[in-house]
Image (tube, grey):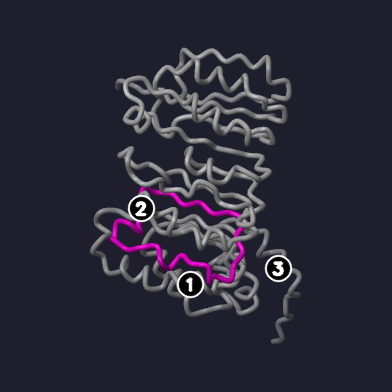
């Protein structure tokens, strides 16, 4: 009996309608037509950080350029203590570079540096030879302070990069360590950055000469307490960055962990800056006694405050 073929347009509509990944995977196994329409969606985003899943994924795209070309977003593997000597975890690194070189259409890349440093490997594979042009890069996880210099060839080769997040760069516990971030990264590299997330050193290097509109400035009161004993203050850092904040429309300013010291005067200093274009200000993890005066910030439309409430139970 002749079974009429379903039009490709209808197959495409069915595939795009399915939201559940497992259902879509099951459907892709029913016929070559459904498989052809499902695979670009199934491989479009890889955010499962489980090492076993990562190994299978990277092994596939390292050897299959067609499937690798479907990848638009990739979040790398996480690491746990028991993974260190695991054979699958070692294999992941063997496929990582080849897989990334095949992801020609990759636009968003989140990389866990803690997984890298945990295996005592360097960052040499992150170089300027990759064919993709990222829109967004996030490097997270603590690692050696010199890491920023090692990834600069990779970052500066991404000329279309618009969003950069390096929240844990510049977290050396010793004040006499070499500055982990070059003082100024020229605007010919990454000229289109509209969003930057990081600590003071990173902002100092990237903000000059750029029309950045969104900044997430992460503070670390523990490290500042070491450098400026006995009372931590951010006044000098705020004043040094103030000239580069004039184009900002969004500023998130606060601690990267638990609420810190009562720094009322420091936060009041923000209201006195010439932030004529600022529309949204987020104060993150500040002391609960803080009073904020926004009367000088006429452009402000949204004032957000986020406070971690610690329970004794």
Residue 68 visible to an observer of this rendering: yes
Quickly name the residue at label 2: 114
Of badges 1 and 3, nearer the viewer stands 1
Question: Can you see residue 39?
Answer: no
Screen quadrant of the N terminus: bottom right
Q: Quadrant of residue 252?
A: top right
Pointer 1 residue: 99
Mark number, residue 12: 3
Query: Where in the figure is residue 307, as x and y percent of width and height?
Result: 47, 24
Question: Distance from label 1 to label 3 (Cα)?
Answer: 27 Å
Image quadrant in which you'd find residue 313:
top left
Confirm or deny contact between disc 2 and disc 1 (CB under 8 A). no
Labels 2 & 3 near each other (Cβ < 8 A): no
For the residues labelled 2 and 1, the Cα–Cα distance comes to: 20 Å
| 150 and 243: which is toward the camera | 243
Please state which of the two labelled residues, at mark 2 or mark 3, is closer to the viewer: 2
Q: What residue span does the magenta drawing correspond to? A: 114-143
Does the magenta-highlighted stretch encompass residue 128? yes
| Residue 103 vertical placement versus 241 (above, below) | below
Give percent across and percent down for residue 58: 45, 70
Q: In percent of the image, x 63 and y 39: which residue is there?
A: 214
């Amino acid at each position: 009996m002749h079974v009429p073929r379903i039009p490709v347009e209808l197959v495409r509509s069915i595939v795009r309608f399915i939201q559940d990944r497992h259902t879509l995977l099951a459907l892709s196994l029913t016929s070559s037509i459904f498989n052809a329409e499902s695979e670009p969606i199934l491989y479009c985003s890889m955010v499962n950080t489980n090492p076993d899943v990562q190994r299978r994924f990277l092994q596939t795209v390292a050897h299959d350029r067609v499937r690798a070309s479907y990848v638009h977003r990739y979040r790398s593997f996480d690491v746990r203590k028991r993974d260190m000597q695991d054979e699958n975890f070692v294999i992941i690194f063997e496929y990582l570079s080849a897989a990334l070189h095949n992801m020609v259409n990759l636009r968003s890349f989140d990389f866990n540096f803690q997984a890298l440093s945990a295996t005592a490997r360097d960052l040499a594979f992150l170089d300027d030879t990759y064919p993709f042009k990222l829109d967004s890069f996030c490097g997270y996880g603590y690692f050696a302070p010199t890491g920023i210099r090692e990834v600069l060839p990779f970052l500066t080769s991404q000329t279309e990069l618009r969003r950069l997040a390096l929240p844990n760069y510049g977290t050396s516990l010793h004040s006499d360590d070499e500055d982990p971030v070059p003082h100024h990264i020229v605007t010919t590299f990454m000229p289109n950055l509209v969003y930057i997330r990081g600590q003071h050193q990173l902002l100092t290097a990237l903000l000059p000469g750029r029309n950045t509109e969104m900044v997430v400035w992460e503070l670390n009161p523990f490290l500042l307490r070491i450098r400026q004993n006995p009372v931590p203050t951010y006044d000098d850092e705020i004043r040094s960055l103030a000239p580069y904040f004039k184009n900002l429309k969004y500023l998130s300013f606060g601690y990267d962990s638990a609420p810190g010291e009562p720094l009322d005067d420091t936060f009041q200093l923000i209201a006195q800056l010439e932030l004529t274009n600022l529309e949204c200000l987020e104060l993150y993890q500040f002391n609960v006694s803080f009073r904020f005066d926004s009367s000088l910030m006429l452009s402000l439309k949204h004032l957000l405050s986020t406070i971690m409430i610690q329970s004794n139970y």
